[in-house]
Image (cartoon, helix red, strand yellow):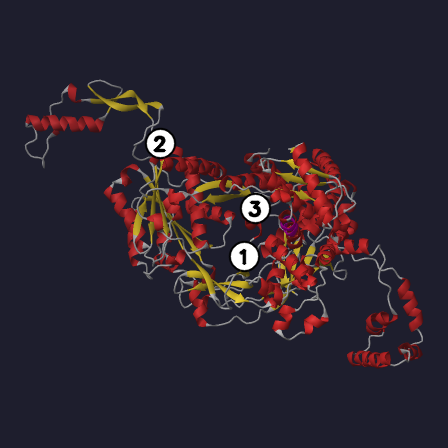
């Protein structure tokens, strides 16, 4: 691993100037390293952070990565890590014109890391330094505690997707304050429902009255106060109470585990903390994959196309670029999708289409020819890259125009019995279906929280919020065993499971041909769900219905 | 850098601490030309977390996950298709242009990797019913034994051989006019007829094993079932190569409604075909080969058969008959049935008729059956091998 040559560094600096001209913003300092493919294989299990702590799972990944490379050699162009200064890794031997293109791509990533608000909590941390000190702590612990450190890491990593990423981000962005509790909110949300426990009917009546009063000049609360003299007092009291933020599972265990409170287990807390912080650091990256890659691809294309250094390499560029950013006939390419969507947003904004006038237009031709020549697309996409993440990006900006403009569709796959083949077909060209399909692929860990009511007598009671999906059953046992270890007592997990009808086999008229079941034309009905509780006690898992 | 062995050693220690092992041995298959795929052995592991899963109700068999796409066309248009099974293509025949050197090379690659895998597995298994049988291959090792015969002098009198010789001599002399009424007192015994055993230097021979791998490659075997069967046979094969190094010979047989022998493990491993299933054909072919080449005399014979349990012959009469013949000479028959998930708890045909015939109980030492689900993981597959060779 070595720094790039002065010549190559010069190219990078030149690229920075031109990228800034277009409105990208990033720190002056960056580090570029040349690495071998072998380095890459060894770094990637450590999410490319050279100083990340050692752990045997990384070793397993390295070994399998080497095997994979032997079978399918690949040459990644670049990898950037979100550090200060930003560090990027490259292969040796790239020609200069290719470096120009790659550097634009990298600058796109760096700009994204340093401006997207979802990364706010990573801005003030020196990750490589932090990781190095964590690595030393782990190494030190390992020399004292041996392989139990690895168990502690394993079990902490088992719950590192349950860290309260949004909560912490919210805390930073809101500066630790919470929204002022308004009187109306207090009255309807807390007073009527929790304190007075009024009937449903009465509650609705109050809402109607609120709406009626709201139009006139009368004060809605006059009647409230006369009816409930204690209302004002209670409201003031409630408004001054600072709500303690709900602890996520990791925090809860850190603070309340009887096992971790014992002196000889205190060291495990540092391990959990390290794992938790590492996970928090990478959360924004997982949640902005399409945007981040799309943004970088958008800029490498835009900037390189108007760069004079492309001269003579136009067709080379076209080939490399097509490899990276072409839309596959079937399948998803986040680079391509994100890039297209940014292009689409810019185009729509340039024409001034994000307004009610346009949205209410019924005439397709008028819609097509709509153009207010706003030409504010450039600033607009800079805003988008600042304030959106993958979910909001897709959910907000994928529209029917986007689907139609790029000929997109949801591809289905079904079995053709007669031809003994899988058929790919156009399942839908509706924007809603397309959005749903993309959103289904996004990172979305289950929402699991500590149920305070159930957590007593040494039992940790976890509740999984139902979102129409079951948990992966094979993983439950080991994860819960880890939590039991860290918690120092039995762990219960409440979750939902689909009820299986248990008659699938008899449905099959033709045993050796699974596909013929389709000839029944029977559509499976809506899935029935039931709540289950998994109980982990003394490393034994059992389950029962709620 | 840590080695695979060290990792596995660490993994073993997990059990002492009361946790399950976590490292699995995985295989990456690098597709090669002419069906000569290269298998690369790598460790894998899963970090368990609470994650969402798809809903598996088992009712939407015919439909895959939707994904994105681009291009022209209207809703409902078919834009492409993919055969369920790879074309057999290079399956038949050896492939004209393929040089022997190339073939050898990739074989070697498989063997060396299989050797690694076998090493990992070897702690768990040993071949059952291994008997001292005929000796064909030699090892450069000598023992001293009373094996050579000498007329006249020696350490021990070989009574049987001596008696034979005496009878022979006396027949020539005309001392045995009537074989139904032999008068031994009239025998003339020459010192030269006394046959002794003498101490001599002998090359030592190890017991020979011949393994038949049988695989159903019929139409019903699509997808995971084949993967599971092949996984199990890859492991078995790898382990055999390691444990019994040069002492094990292997033969490979594929069958649908007909059975055919293929020359190497690659072909065995990679061929796919669509067709019906007649299980007995494979067993019959083994019986024929064994008889034709007189293998039972020289070898301990093991037969491993992998199937999804589907058979056109529902009563399995022919299969049972062939198995019956086979039981006369084999050391072990191991039948693995990998059930499709959609079969549910229903027993498959092969399982049913094997159980019905009672053959499993009558010859419990010679024939074993193992039934697993198509989603079986490596540890289940290894457990399966243990069952088959227990």
Residue B16 visible? The answer is no
Q: Position of residue B309 (x, y in %)?
A: 39, 57
Residue, far top:
B153
Left or right placement of residue B107 versus residue B71 in this view: left
Residue B171 magenta: no
Q: Is residue B93 above or below residue A357?
A: above
Left or right placement of residue A45 versus residue A145 in this view: left
How many callouts does the rendering have? 3
Q: Tell whether label 3 touches label 2 (CB within 8 Å).
A: no
Residue B66 visible? The answer is yes
**Which residue, given by chain and number where applicable, does mark 3 sit on?**
A314
Left or right placement of residue B240 versus residue A439 in this view: left
Determine whether the residue tagged by mark 3 lies in a helix, strand or loop.
helix
Please state which of the two labelled residues, at mark 1 or mark 2, is closer to the viewer. 1
Dot 1 surroundings within 10 Å: few (below 14), some, or many (20 or more)?
some
Dot 2 surroundings within 10 Å: few (below 14), some, or many (20 or more)?
some
In the rendered image, residues at marks 1 and 2 fall on the same chain: no
Q: Is residue A203 above or below residue A256?
A: below
Looking at the rendering, the stretch of residues picked out in magenta corresponds to A297-302
Please state which of the two labelled residues, at mark 2 or mark 3, is closer to the viewer. 3
User: In the rendered structure, which disc, 3 or 1, sits on the residue that comes first in sequence?
Assistant: 3
């Amino acid at each position: 691993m070595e720094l790039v040559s002065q010549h190559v560094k010069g190219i990078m600096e030149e690229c920075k100037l031109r990228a800034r001209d277009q409105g990208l913003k990033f720190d002056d300092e960056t580090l570029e390293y040349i690495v071998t493919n072998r380095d890459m294989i060894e770094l990637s299990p450590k999410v490319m952070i050279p100083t990340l702590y050692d752990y045997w799972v990384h070793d397993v990944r390295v070994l399998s990565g080497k095997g994979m490379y032997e079978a399918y050699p690949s040459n990644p162009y670049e990898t950037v890590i979100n550090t200060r200064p930003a560090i990027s890794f490259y292969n040796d031997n790239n020609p200069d014109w290719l470096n120009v293109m790659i550097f634009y791509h990298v600058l796109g990533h760096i700009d994204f890391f340093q401006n997207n608000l979802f990364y706010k909590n990573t801005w003030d941390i020196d990750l490589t330094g932090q990781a190095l000190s964590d690595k030393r702590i782990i190494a030190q612990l390992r020399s004292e505690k041996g392989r139990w450190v690895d168990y502690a890491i394993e079990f902490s990593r088992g719950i590192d997707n349950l860290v309260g990423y949004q909560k912490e981000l919210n805390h930073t962005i809101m500066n630790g304050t919470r929204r002022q509790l308004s009187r109306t909110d207090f009255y309807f949300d807390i007073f009527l429902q929790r304190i007075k426990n009024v009937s449903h009917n009465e509650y609705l009546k109050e809402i109607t009255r609120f709406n009626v009063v709201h139009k006139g000049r009368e004060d809605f609360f006059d009647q409230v106060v006369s009816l409930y003299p204690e209302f004002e007092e209670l409201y003031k009291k409630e408004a001054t109470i600072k709500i303690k933020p709900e602890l996520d599972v990791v925090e809860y265990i850190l603070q309340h585990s009887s096992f971790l409170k014992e002196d000889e287990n205190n060291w495990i807390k540092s391990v959990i903390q390290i794992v938790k912080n590492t996970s928090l650091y990478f959360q924004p990256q997982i949640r902005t994959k399409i945007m981040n890659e799309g943004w970088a691809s958008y800029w490498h294309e835009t900037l390189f196309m108007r760069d004079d250094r492309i001269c003579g390499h136009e067709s080379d560029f076209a080939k490399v670029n097509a490899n990276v950013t072409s839309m596959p006939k079937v399948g998803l390419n986040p680079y391509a999708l994100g890039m297209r969507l940014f292009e689409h947003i810019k185009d729509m904004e340039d024409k001034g289409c994000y307004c009610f006038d346009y949205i209410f237009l019924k005439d397709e031709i008028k819609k097509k020819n709509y153009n207010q020549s706003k030409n504010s697309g450039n600033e607009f996409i800079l805003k988008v890259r600042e304030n959106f993440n993958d979910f909001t990006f897709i959910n907000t900006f994928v529209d029917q125009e986007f689907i139609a403009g790029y000929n997109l569709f949801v591809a289905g796959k079904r079995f053709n019995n007669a031809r003994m083949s899988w058929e790919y077909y156009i399942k839908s060209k509706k924007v809603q279906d397309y959005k749903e399909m993309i959103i289904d692929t996004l990172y979305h860990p289950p929402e699991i929280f500590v149920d305070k009511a159930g957590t007593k007598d040494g039992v940790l009671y976890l509740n999984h919020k139902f979102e129409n999906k079951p948990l992966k059953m094979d993983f439950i046992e080991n994860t819960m065993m880890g939590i039991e270890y860290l918690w120092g007592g039995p762990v219960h997990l409440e979750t939902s499971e689909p009820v299986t009808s248990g008659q699938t086999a008899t449905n099959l008229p033709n045993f050796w041909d699974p596909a013929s079941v389709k000839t029944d034309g029977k559509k499976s009905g809506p899935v029935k769900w039931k709540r289950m509780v998994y109980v982990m006690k003394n490393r034994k898992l059992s389950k029962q219905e709620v | 850098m840590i080695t695979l062995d060290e990792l596995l050693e660490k993994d073993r220690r997990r059990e002492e601490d009361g946790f399950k092992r976590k490292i699995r041995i995985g295989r990456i298959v690098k597709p090669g030309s002419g069906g000569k795929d290269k298998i690369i052995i790598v460790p894998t592991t899963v970090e368990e977390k609470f994650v969402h899963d798809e809903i598996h109700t088992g009712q939407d068999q015919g439909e895959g996950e939707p994904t994105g796409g681009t291009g022209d066309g209207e809703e409902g248009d078919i834009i492409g298709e993919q055969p369920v099974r790879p074309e057999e293509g290079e399956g038949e025949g050896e492939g004209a242009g393929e040089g022997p050197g190339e073939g050898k090379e990739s074989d070697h690659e498989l063997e060396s990797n299989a050797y690694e895998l076998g090493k990992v597995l070897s702690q768990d298994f040993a071949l059952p019913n291994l008997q001292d049988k005929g000796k064909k291959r030699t090892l450069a090792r000598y023992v001293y034994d009373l094996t050579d015969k000498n007329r006249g002098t020696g350490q021990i009198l070989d009574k049987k051989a001596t008696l034979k010789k005496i009878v022979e001599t006396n027949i020539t002399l005309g001392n045995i006019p009537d074989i139904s009424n032999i008068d031994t007192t009239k025998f003339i015994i020459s010192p030269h007829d006394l046959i002794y055993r003498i101490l001599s230097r002998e090359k030592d021979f190890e017991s020979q094993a011949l393994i038949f791998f049988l695989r159903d490659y019929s139409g019903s075997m699509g997808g995971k079932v084949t993967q599971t069967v092949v996984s199990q046979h890859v492991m078995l094969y790898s382990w055999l190569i390691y444990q019994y190094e040069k002492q094990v010979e292997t033969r490979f047989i594929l069958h649908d409604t007909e059975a055919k022998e293929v020359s190497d493990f690659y072909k065995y491993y990679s061929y796919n075909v669509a067709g019906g299933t007649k299980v007995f054909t494979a067993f019959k072919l083994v019986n024929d080969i064994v008889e034709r080449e007189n293998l039972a005399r020289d070898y301990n014979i093991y037969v491993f058969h992998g199937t999804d349990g589907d058979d056109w012959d529902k009563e399995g009469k022919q299969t049972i008959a062939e198995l019956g013949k086979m039981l006369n000479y084999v050391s072990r028959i191991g039948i693995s049935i990998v059930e499709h998930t959609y079969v549910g708890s229903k027993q498959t045909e092969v399982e049913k008729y094997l159980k019905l015939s009672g053959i499993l109980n009558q010859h419990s030492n010679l024939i074993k059956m193992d039934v697993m689900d198509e989603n079986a993981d490596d540890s289940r597959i290894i457990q399966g091998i243990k069952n088959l060779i227990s």
